[in-house]
Amino acid sequence: MPDSKPIHAAIYVRISKDSEQMGLGVKRQEKLCRELLERRGWDLYDAYRDNDVSATRSDSRPAYERMVRDITDGLVQGIVVYAVDRLTRSPRELEDVIDWADEHKLELASVTTDINLATPDGRAMARNQGMFAKLEAEKQSLRLKAKLQQLAEDGRHVGPRPFGWDWSVNEDGTKGKDLVINEHEAGLVKEIADKVLSGATLYSIVQYLNEEVQIRTARGAKWRSQNVRKLLMRPSNAGIKVHNGIELREGDWPKIFDRDKHERLVALLTDPSRVTNRGTSVKHLLSGLVVCALCNSPMHSNASREHKVDYTLADGTVKTSVTHRPGKYRCHPPGCQKASQNREMIDHMVTEYVLGLLRREGVEIFGGDMELVENTQERIASIKAKLALNTDRWIEGKITVEQYDRANAALQPQLSQAEKELRLAMPSAEFQEFAGPGVDQAWEQADLHKRRQVIRVLQDAGFKVKIGQLGRKARYQPGAVPAFNPDTVELWWGDQRLNPPRDARATN
Ligand SMILES: [Zn+2]
């Protein structure tokens, strides 16, 4: 048959959950399709890409619909796909394509199989391939279901030996399938958990494990902050089995510490205000804990600096003039950069208020509220049950992956909020001395990290420091503290300002 008009072809790719799992990214699908298109000598009319994580349920495929319009308008005479099941999601859709082959002389090219829709054999093959893919998807979901169910039922640990446990030994001396406590390692896990809960940095723990104890991870590596963090947040520490972020059940292995401690560690180590000082040691009391009054960005501090200028005297000797520049908390980019004030003065001012607050409210803030603890724990349990139910429904095929994700996305923030509330309600032994009259002495003896922790707990309870611009009257005043205007440093407790500006106080 002589070449008449070149075929204008569409490349159609669809990304779906199963193709991702099989490592068939959309880019690779498209690349293979383009190669096939060239081999066939077709012209590319357009590439159509749909993102569809479910093979059977999602209704909307905008690119596919656009392609159908272009086919029926006669603009496209060929389709290149990776496999037939990328193109059609049901036997009925495949029949549509076969109809277009009749009406519009449409040709179909598939990377995985040679298909000629013009012949009965080719059509049968396409139908088979579509069916086969559907069957394969169903088998896969059955395998997944079986695997998850097995995991759910089987509390056993799978994977390499975790730090803190050893594999049990069978009577014949071979390696068993159960975990038994490794007393030395489990003791260390307990010890560093307590250290972190009472204010030690992850970095200091890393030093401790690597240098002092001289122990390696279960895989024989040196400890790093990330390992320590992961180690302390493992649900398995409290005997909890988790799969895909969903708590399945208590595992069958001995726990290192109780669930309470686990939850407090998770709350502490996932506290967003910690992220600002990950890895490095923070040198200033309020770095990352105070915010810009104008744009709400967290403010950090630079070190105080000496500003040196060399100048030459008439006799040729060189002298150096040194000016002391006070350290400041500053609004840095991406913040507005408009606010910055004297760090020492703000530290002093905030400390005064914090101590006053702790003397008055400390017992309530740190003393704990058992009723609230119980209520919140119940709430957490019910949210976790909903998450587990969501997983079950997905495993059973009652909901699509999108619905699963949507439900998860709705429940996760509720869970973090409840966990935060639990941390607040929990009576915390590590802060007991900061409650009530002993607070001044406790504060005096606490190191910087402990003090920052105290301020974080207060922040969770509603304390906030906002630093504004200096304002005109704070400038150029002889004898005044440089770069500091207490009127524009706002201390808040909930929506009540603790230090109303002087002008307001004068008129009251
Ligand atoms: Zn700002």
Image: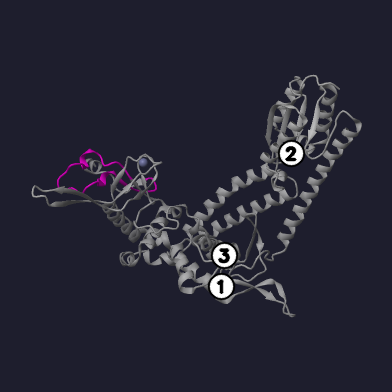
How busy is the neighbourhood of tag 3: few (under 14 within 10 Å), some, or many (20 plus)? some
Residue 277 vertical placement versus 487 (above, below): below
Left or right? Give the position of 150 relative to 358: right
Amino acid tagged 3: Arg
Dividing the image into four quarters, tell me where ligand 1 lies: top left
Front disc: 3 or 2: 2
Mark 2 packing: few (<14 Cα in 10 Å), some, or many (20+)?
few
Q: Do the residues labelled 2 and 1 touch (CB within 8 Å)?
A: no
Q: Which residue is drawn at 76% across and 30% down?
A: 79
Quadrant in the picture for the C terminus: top left
Q: Where is residue 316 in the image (x, y as percent from the top left)?
A: 11, 50
Of 332 and 292, which appears nearest the observer?
332
Q: Which residue is disc 1 drawn over?
A: 186
- Measure the C-alpha gap from mark 1 to mark 3: 15 Å
Residue at the image position 66 percent from the left and 62 percent from the top = 249
Disc on res. 259: 3
The kind of residue on which mark 1 rests is: Ala
Instruction: Based on the picture, tell me whether residue 491 belongs to the magenta stretch.
Output: yes
Are the residues tagged 3 and 2 within 8 Å (C-beta)? no
Q: Is mark 3 on a helix, strand or loop?
A: helix
Quarter occupied by residue 56: top right
Reading the image, the residue beneath label 2 is: 57
- Sequence-wise first label, 3 or 2: 2
Q: Which amino acid does label 2 sit on?
A: Arg
Identify which residue, 354 or 34, lies in the foreground: 34
Find residue 412 and report its horizontal and vertical position in percent: 58, 49
Residue range highlighted in magenta? 467-495
**Mark 1 element type:** helix
Q: Residue at x 8, y 50 (%)?
A: 315
